[in-house]
Image (cartoon, grey):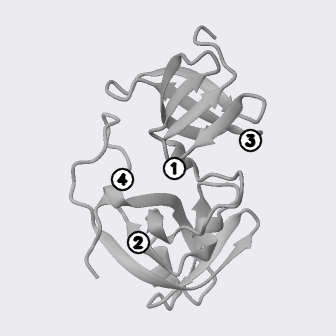
């Protein structure tokens, strides 16, 4: 299997520490409901930092390593994973800080009105008056709900932060990469 580029992989969490003596790792998931992480049969690990000192993405060549997942389960807000080839605590501890990535094609199918946030990034956003508000640049979790950062895709400047709640989000059309909101451009 050839190594994919970082652009083809989605980061789902990071190795927090070793768990126990048999080589399990404790993963801090980026999602409160890590469905894709728990269903993964194989993962890519990378120790490349997400950002350098200046805040820009690292230009270093990605050092990716593929692991088969033998077992994964939720435990107190983290995911415990057993990886093929990681058999003791020292090997697991050496993975501390590694980013966990999987290919988007390996995500399980989303149910009904559920969306993977990664699929919403890049969608054009319009309000009910058909004004273009911008493009979804990022989505974050604030505890109660998701928050979309909407702005200019060229400059990456965020113009608005909009809650991703049903009262505001009226339609998501993933095939056409568009989202309609009950939101005004001057809010």
| Residue position marked by numbered label 1 in the rendering | 119
Which of the pair 133/137 is nearer the observer?
A: 133
Residue at 29% in and 82% down: 1
Which of the pair 109/26 is nearer the observer?
A: 109
| Residue position marked by numbered label 2 in the rendering | 44
Q: Is residue 25 above or below residue 176?
A: below
* Labels 3 and 4: the sequence-earlier one: 4
Where residue 46 appears, x then y in whole percent? 37, 65
Measured in 3D between alpha carbons, the distance from the residue under mark 1 to the one under mark 2, in whole angstroms, is 20 Å
User: Are the residues at dot 2 and dot 4 in contact (C-beta closer than 8 Å)?
Assistant: no
Viewer-side label of 1, 4: 1
Query: Which quarter of the rendering shows the C terminus?
Result: top right
Residue at 46% in and 67% down: 105
Within-10-Å neighbours for mark 3: few <14, some 14–19, many 20+: few
Location of residue 148 (image quadrant)? top right
Which of the pair 138/172 is nearer the observer?
A: 172
* Labels 1 and 4: the sequence-earlier one: 4
| Residue position marked by numbered label 3 in the rendering | 143
Report helix, strand or loop for mark 1. Answer: helix
Report helix, strand or loop for mark 4. Answer: loop
Measured in 3D between alpha carbons, the distance from the residue under mark 2 to the one under mark 4, in whole angstroms, is 14 Å
Within-10-Å neighbours for mark 1: few <14, some 14–19, many 20+: few
Measured in 3D between alpha carbons, the distance from the residue under mark 3 to the one under mark 1, in whole angstroms, is 20 Å
Residue at 50% in and 48% down: 175
Left or right? Give the position of 47 relative to 22: left
Q: Is residue 104 above or below residue 120?
A: below
* Labels 2 and 4: the sequence-earlier one: 2
Q: Is residue 100 visible?
A: no
Residue at 53% in and 28% down: 125
């Amino acid at each position: 299997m050839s190594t994919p580029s970082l652009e083809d992989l989605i980061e789902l969490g990071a190795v927090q520490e070793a768990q126990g003596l048999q080589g399990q790792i404790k993963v801090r998931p980026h999602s409160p409901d890590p469905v894709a992480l728990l269903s993964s049969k194989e993962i890519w690990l990378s120790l490349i930092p997400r950002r350098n000192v200046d805040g820009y993405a690292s230009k270093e060549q990605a050092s990716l390593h593929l692991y088969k997942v033998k077992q994964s389960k939720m435990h107190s807000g983290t995911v415990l994973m057993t990886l093929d080839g990681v058999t003791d605590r020292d090997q697991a501890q050496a993975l501390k800080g590694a980013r966990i990535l999987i290919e988007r094609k390996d995500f399980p199918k989303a149910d009904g009105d559920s969306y993977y946030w990664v699929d919403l990034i890049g969608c054009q956003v319009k309000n009910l008056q058909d004004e273009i508000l911008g493009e979804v640049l990022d989505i974050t979790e604030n505890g109660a709900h998701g928050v979309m950062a909407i702005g200019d895709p060229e400059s990456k400047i965020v113009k608005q932060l909009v809650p991703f709640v049903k009262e505001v989000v009226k339609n998501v059309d993933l095939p056409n990469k568009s989202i309609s909101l009950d939101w005004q451009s001057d809010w």
